[in-house]
Image (tube, grey):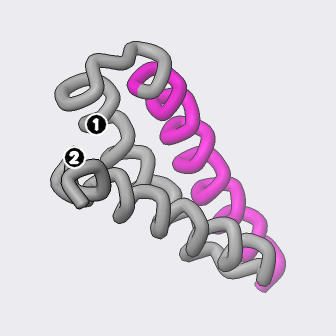
Amino acid sequence: MELFLKYYTLDWLAMALSLLAVYLLGNKNKYGFISFSIANVLWIFLGFFLMNSLGIGIGNIVFLIMNVRGFISWNKKNNTNG
């Protein structure tokens, strides 16, 4: 059981939010970007501070930037269509 609680269940929350985001985006729901962004922030925290993994931290910074860009693009596209 200790293995499942090693990172205070933040890793499980980040994984669940990532899966929810994939589902939402697959259904063309822009809230998937928000879910992914929250998951990215959790992964950044986990990567840098709890796991000591530069790869997880830096990778999720890039993913976070891409998610914010996607959210902004989605809103621009919806605003121009009416």
The span picked out in magenta is 57-82
Considering depth in this image, is 63 or 75 the residue closer to the camera? 63
Q: Which residue is nearer to you in this view: 52 or 34?
A: 52
Circle on res. 7: 2
Instruction: Find residue 74 and report its horizontal and vertical position in percent.
Output: 70, 64
- Report which quarter residue 24 is drawn in: bottom right
Q: What residue is shown at x 78% (from left), y 83% (from top)? A: 27
Is 18 rendered above or below residue 42? Answer: below
Q: Give the residue at x 47% y 67%.
A: 17
Q: Please say if the residues under marks 1 and 2 sit with CB atoms less than 8 Å apart.
A: yes
Our reading of the magenta stretch's main secondary structure is helix
Name the quarter where the N terminus is drawn: bottom left
Using the image, determine if residue 4 lies above or below residue 59. below
Residue 15: image location, x then y, percent: 48, 58
Q: Which residue is mark 1?
A: 46
Camera sees residue 79: no
For image coordinates 39% across by 14% down, the residue present is: 54
Q: Amino acid at mark 2?
A: Tyr
Left or right side of 17 for 71: right
Residue 71: in magenta span: yes
Q: Amino acid at mark 1?
A: Leu
Question: Viewer-nearest of labels 1 and 2?
Answer: 2
Residue 29, position as x, y percentages in the image: 68, 80
Residue 61 colored in magenta in the image: yes
Instruction: Indicate left or right for 11 with 27 as reference.
Output: left
Cα separation, mark 1 vs mark 2, equals 8 Å
Q: Give the percent coordinates (x, y) of residue 65.
A: 52, 36
Callout 1 crowding tier (Cα within 10 Å): few <14, some 14–19, many ≥20:
some
Secondary structure found at label 1: helix
